[in-house]
Amino acid sequence: MLQKIKETADFLMQTYPSKAKIAIVLGSGLNNLIQDIAVEHIVSYADIPNFPISTVKGHEGNLLFGKLNGVAVVAMQGRFHYYEGYDMKQVTFPIRVFKAMGVENVILSNAAGGINPLFHVGDIMMITDHINLFPEHPLRGKNEDSLGPRFPDMSETYSKVLLQKAEQIAQKHNILYHKGVYVGTQGPTFETPAEYKMFRFIGGDCVGMSTVPEAIVAHHTNMNCIAFSVVTDLGISDVVEKVSHQEVLNAACVAEPKLRLIVSELVKVI
Ligand code: HPA
């Protein structure tokens, strides 16, 4: 794996030599965040050695290099989900590559189902912690000690310093936000009413199908990580409304300007 990471990082650094400070991974329906980036270089995933090949028809898969608010960033336009069939090493490979390129900070975002009864569709939740219910672990297997420890401490997966900065920005702009626990599941089914209830019972505030693997690997390799959920549907009452992918995308679009503002100001103070 080390060899592959190095090969990919070297390739990207050759095609675009200036160093990004922050990596941004965008969730479903949140791709417009990219519009704020002054793009200087685009590489299709298909042209990146060792990168997983996208399985989803019409899914854009590009790495964007450029400036967000004057700060050098690399953004993933399209992420790799476990439910698409990738294994966890593939899902988290880009994070490993970013670290090898000298990127020290990761901003993750996702669309998620709200299970805290105080949440509404369109709300933003800053992730303070997660519950990992994926059936495969990204760190399973021989540990590469040069990447991170065998048994990583997980008491602060999401950087408290970054969280505090994000909170200050949200408060300054009167953006309502929540803080809470993200339950990561494999999908691709949304939850049954009984599952939503169980996830609330075990301490979740939101549930979704991404983010946890990337956050684990970012933390393992000592990057600062912050993650945001946009609440796109609710699984809180006894009668759970039907949810479709299109509804998730629509709701994410509505919330997007708020998250866009937070992220574009956050990069300046990281
Ligand atoms: N459950 C799981 N993943 C999701 C949901 C949900 O309700 N909404 C958006 N992604």
Image (spheres, rainbow, N blue to C red):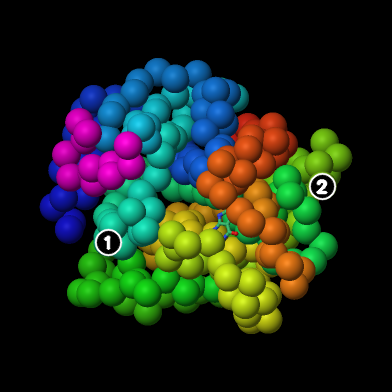
For the residue carrying disc 1, how many other residues have a C-alpha within 10 Å: few (<14), some (14-19), or many (20+)? Answer: some
- Marks counted in the figure total 2
* Foreground pick, 28 / 145: 28
Residue 262 sits in quarter: top right
Disc sitting over residue 237 in the figure: none
Q: Is 209 displayed left or right of 40 in the figure?
A: right
Numbered disc 1: secondary structure: loop
In this rendering, is residue 145 above or below 70?
below
Q: Which residues are magenta?
A: 46-57
- Circle 1 residue: 87
- Circle 2 residue: 176
In this rendering, is residue 249 above or below 216?
above
Tell me which label, 2 or 1, sits earlier in the chain. Answer: 1
Disc 2 marks a residue whose amino acid type is: Leu
Q: Residue at x 52, y 54 (%)?
A: 225
Q: Residue at x 48, y 67 (%)?
A: 185
In this rendering, is residue 27 above or below 11?
below
Residue 199 sits in quarter: bottom right
